[in-house]
Amino acid sequence: MIRWLLGRDTPALDGAIAFAPEEEADGARLRHPGRRREWLLGRVTAKTLILRHLRECGQPVGDPRRIAIRAAESGAPRVFLDGRELPVSLSISHSHGKALCAVCPRERGLLGVDLERIEPRSPAFAADYFSEHERFLAGAVPRPERDFALTLFWCVKEAVLKALGTGLRRDPRTVEVLDLPAGGVDPARALSVKLADGTVPAVCCGRMEGMACAIAVLPEK
């Protein structure tokens, strides 16, 4: 099962959850206030989700400081309980005061999530990062929904690239959205996507509070 949580930046965020010493050190290294606030929002949301995941799996953890979320060399978050890495896949995305996190058992696959504010995308941006087919799909959408479609396509690409562990080091054009269902996309709608090598990730996407969101799952190789 994939569990997800949308977090919001509020005054209650400070002190909302206790961090492990390693996490405190990670946060202290972030000197820019905006970057540190993003980190705080992402970590509070992620730890809240991990605690829920463990509780619902029959492994409740009373003290949040027993859990540490640390970044791997690739930047992907890893989860530790009492110093031992847990066999879970966790992904975190934050944008404009909101954070989206998702977690699942690693045997279920490798997760990637992305969250983007719905806004116009220039023709130059679309030409650089979207396939001819994706541009056709977006062009067929009524104008009020076109910004959402293009933002969603970008969101899907980022989520899949996170699941791959490459992020934008890999060309986003190697991830292609194949369809955009009639009637729009809701938060529980699956979307057909393929990679250049033929891999077909499972992708669920939609919109929440003016944001496009996507969760992608790939089998662990």
Image: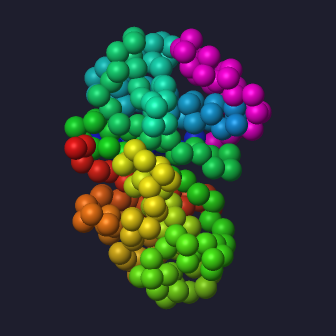
Above or below, 131 relative to 208 = below
Residue at image x 75%, y 38%? 34
Residue 206 seen in the current view: no
Q: Which corner quadrant of the image does residue 87 belong to?
A: top left
Classify residue 8 as left or right of residue 214: right
Q: Above or below — where is 175 with respect to 166?
A: below
Does 14 appear in magenta?
Answer: yes
Residue in view at x 63 percent, y 77 percent: 124
Which coloring applies here? Answer: rainbow
Tell me the quarter of the image containing the N terminus: top left
The number of discs equals 0
Q: Quadrant of the C terminus?
A: top left
Q: Looking at the rendering, which quadrant does residue 214 occupy?
A: bottom left
- Can residue 35 be spotted in the picture? yes
Q: Check residue 124 for magenta coloring.
A: no
Q: Is residue 106 left or right of residue 10?
A: left
Please provide percent x and percent y for residue 130.
49, 73
The residue at the point 70 percent across, 37 percent down is 35
Residue 192 sits in which quadrant?
A: bottom left
Look at the picture and state if 74 lies above or below 186: above
Span colored in magenta? 8-34
The x and y percentages for residue 98 are 62, 46
Q: Is residue 159 above or below residue 103?
A: below
- Residue 194: x percent and y percent? 31, 66
Q: 25 and 56: which one is in front?
A: 25
Estimate the x, y position of residue 20 in percent, counting from the top left. Answer: 53, 14
Q: Nearer the viewer, residue 197 or 32?
A: 197
Q: Residue at x 62, y 16 (%)?
A: 25
